[in-house]
Amino acid sequence: MSRKEIEWPALNCLLFVSDPESEDTPAIDGKAAIWTTPECIAVSCLPDCDGPTKIILGAENDVGTHNKLLFDGTVLTPTRKLSVGTVLAEKLLEIDVPTTDTHLKIWTNGHPGSDIVIIGIV
């Protein structure tokens, strides 16, 4: 599993981490920095008008510095792929995962408008 990364100005300051075939998204109440369903994790990030958010995706031991841990759990990945996408359903990054129930951790800089989102596959 190779590390992937991108810098992207995120519309609505949201990123979605899920199986690429999932259409399930959590209800966003604006009171947290992360929202989840069994199939999708929504993560708040830097508003696009303030610049790009750096997104890193890969195996936990390959993703680098671990800032504030926001999520440590599983997401359903029936296609054995995990993707990071936008509110407009644009796929930014995708990685193959070994199981249909993927354990992952997500870190940010701790601010709801974080300029970095690190996703580590455990």
Image (tube, rainbow, N blue to C red):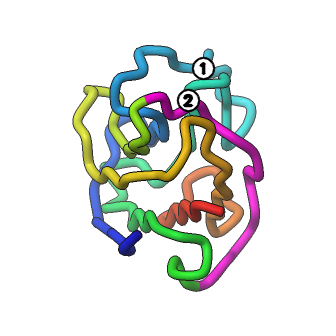
Q: Residue at x 60, y 81 (%)?
A: 61
Percent coordinates x, y for residue 11 in the rendering: 32, 38
On the image, the x and y values in percent for residue 9 come to 29, 53
Residue 47 locus on image (x, y percent): 41, 48
Q: Which mark is residue 40?
A: 2
Residue type beneath disc 2: Cys
**Residue drawn at point x = 39 percent, y = 67 percent:** 54
Q: State the mark number for residue 26.
A: 1
Residue 31, above or below 29: below
Closer to us: 38 or 14:
38
Sooner in the amino-acid sequence: mark 2 or mark 1: 1
Residue 78's place in the image compared with 118, above or below, is above
Q: Are marks 2 and 1 in contact (CB under 8 Å)?
A: yes
Magenta residues, start to end: 65-78
Please tell me how crowded label 1 is: few (under 14), some (14-19), or many (20+) other residues with Cα within 10 Å: some
Among the 4 quarters of the image, the one containing residue 51: bottom left
- The number of discs equals 2
Instruction: Give the crowd class for mark 2: few <14, some 14-19, many >=20 residues within 10 Å.
Output: many
Residue 2: % across, % down: 36, 74
Given the current orientation, which residue lies at the most extreme front position?
98
**Quadrant of residue 3 within the rendered picture:** bottom left
Q: Main secondary structure of the magenta part?
A: strand
Q: CA distance from mark 2 to mark 1?
A: 7 Å
